[in-house]
Image: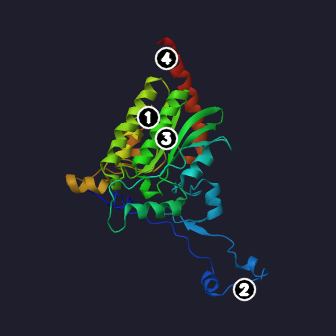
Amino acid sequence: MATTTFSKKTLGLESVEPAVTPPPAGAEAAFNKKPKLGSTKSKKRDIPEGLWTKCPKCATMLFDKELDDNLKVCAKCGHHFPIGARERINALVETCSFEEMDAQMSSVDVLKFTGAATYGDKLEAYQKSTGLKDAVITGVGRINGHRVALGVIDFNFLGGSMGSVVGEKLTRLIEAATEKGLPLVIISASGGARMYEGMFSLMQMAKTCGAVAYHAKARLPYISILTDPTYAGVMASYASVGDLILAEPGAMIGFAGPRVIKDTTQAELPTGFQTAEFLLDHGLIDAIVPRKEMKPRLCDYLQFLTVRMKMAAALG
Ligand SMILES: [Zn+2]
């Protein structure tokens, strides 16, 4: 059983040059310099004027502030950088309209997993580095006029892997959507099921899909948004059963990664294999929506699906 933390490498994805943030000029000197305690005069001088990130696709140096303002999309080539769950929610829902659900739910180390580090230690480290209790944020918010149940996976927390907490929080979200008659939107970025939890993580696949089936039976729309990367147990469960499946440009989406498939089948893979663009051509996803267009496009889709599903329900 795989016990490593999910990363693009362990998923068999092509290596992507990490975004580089070079230190500002004079940063080393400033680091070695002892700060003058009690002095406020030097404070302004020590703050770097800006940080830069190199686009892994077009190699343009991008000013971090501008990159943030552009929802972490390269202004030159349109490359979509990873973005955290909270930033995504802030970009989509109306200010102050998001009511988070089950914010304090956190995982338990049922298997008493030990390896290079215990599962408990890993959870603690990721909770500290991300400020999240686990890899998903769920809640109800407003996207323009539409009240929606929204779940967003954060890849920064253990590769966005689905353990018992991610599965349970999503299931509660879907059940709440069914009960309140709300459309469902889930944004995924995940390496799959969380193997630190063994069978408990695999059970979440059936549980989330079961909840989605009841939501569908109530004739409510479910939009699944796949971002880079969405793989394995997540793609093989709730993420691939949306009424509408959208993806961000260039997102890698699949079950096993291309390197694993190539090694297993000993066959050359077609160009663009498992990219959102390839999957759109082959009918797995319905549309590719750039991050900056996601909100207005979601509104259009929600409007269309809500009206259609109400008409279908009225006709029985
Ligand atoms: Zn670029």
Amino acid type of the residue tagged 2 in the rendering: Lys
Give the residue pinned by disc 4. Answer: 312
Instruction: Give me the residue at 37% from left, 37% from top.
Output: 207
Mark 1 CB in 8 Å range of ligand 1? no
Amino acid type of the residue tagged 3 in the rendering: Ile
Q: Which one is in front in this view, the residue at disc 1 or the one at disc 2?
A: 2
Q: Earlier in the sequence, mark 1 or mark 2?
A: 2
Q: Residues within 10 Å of mark 2 (few under 14, many from 20)?
A: few
* Residue 66 position within the rendered picture, expressed as x and y whole percent measured from the top left: 65, 60
Point out the image quarter for the N terminus: bottom left
- Give the secondary structure at mark 4: helix
Q: Alpha-carbon distance for marks 1 and 2?
A: 58 Å
* Residue 80 position within the rendered picture, expressed as x and y whole percent measured from the top left: 52, 54
Amino acid type of the residue tagged 1 in the rendering: Gly
Q: In which quadrant of the rendered view does residue 122 lie?
A: bottom left
Most foreground residue, 207 or 278: 207
Q: Are marks 3 and 4 in contact (CB under 8 Å)?
A: no
Q: Earlier in the sequence, mark 3 or mark 2?
A: 2
Q: Alpha-carbon distance for marks 1 and 4?
A: 17 Å
Give the residue pinned by disc 1. Answer: 242
Q: Earlier in the sequence, mark 3 or mark 1?
A: 3
Q: Alpha-carbon distance for marks 3 and 1?
A: 9 Å
Mark 3 CB in 8 Å range of ligand 1? no
Q: Which one is in front in this view, the residue at disc 4 or the one at disc 2?
A: 2
